[in-house]
Amino acid sequence: MTDAQKLFCELGENIEGSSAAKLFGKPCYKINNKAYCCFFQNEMVFKLTGDTLQKAKSLEGSQLFDPSGKNRAMKEWVQVPFEDSEFWGYFVKEAAKYVSGK
């Protein structure tokens, strides 16, 4: 297991009410059966909105999540590289709040 995978699991497991699941065949965490983060290409992907989404998108190396690789990115999902993992904890909390409606 890579350091990125370990951090993904640690962050997802520490969100109250979160459960491990799959999203497009990739590991993810859900709250109330709604995915809020996943792990893809050794990077963490978050469902975000507003200023938090813009902040994540502004990080060098981040990109909108395109799991198909066919130029069909998901507009509220941003993929953040491990190089910016110091932000993962913040983004995972914000993503969990967003999907849980808090």
Image: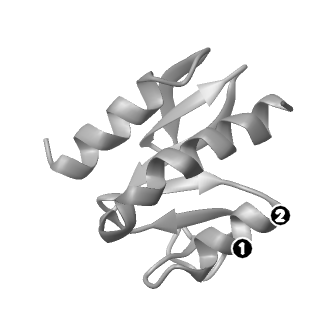
Name the residue type under label 2. Answer: Gly
- Which quadrant of the figure has residue 6? top left
Element at label 2: helix
Q: Residue furthest left?
A: 1
Asked whether the residues under the numbered discs 2 and 1 touch, taking CB atoms below 8 Å apart as contact, a structural biologist would say: yes
Res 73 seen here: no
- Colour convention of the picture: one colour
Check the picture and name the quadrant holding the C terminus. top right
Q: Is residue 14 above or below residue 38?
A: above
Image location (x, y in percent) of residue 32: 72, 19
Left or right: where does residue 15 sit relative to residue 77?
A: left
Is disc 1 placed on a helix, strand or loop?
Answer: helix
Is any part of residue 56 visible from this angle? yes
Q: Could you say which disc has been placed on residue 54 in the image?
A: 1
Mark 2 nearby-residue class (10 Å; few <14, some 14–19, many ≥20): few
Q: Quadrant of residue 65?
A: bottom right
Q: Residue at x 13, y 41 (%)?
A: 1
Q: Is residue 54 above or below residue 53?
A: below
The residue tagged 2 is 50
> What residue is drawn where x is 52% and y is 32%?
29
Q: Residues within 10 Å of mark 1 (few under 14, many from 20)?
A: few
Q: Position of residue 56 (x, y in %)?
A: 60, 69
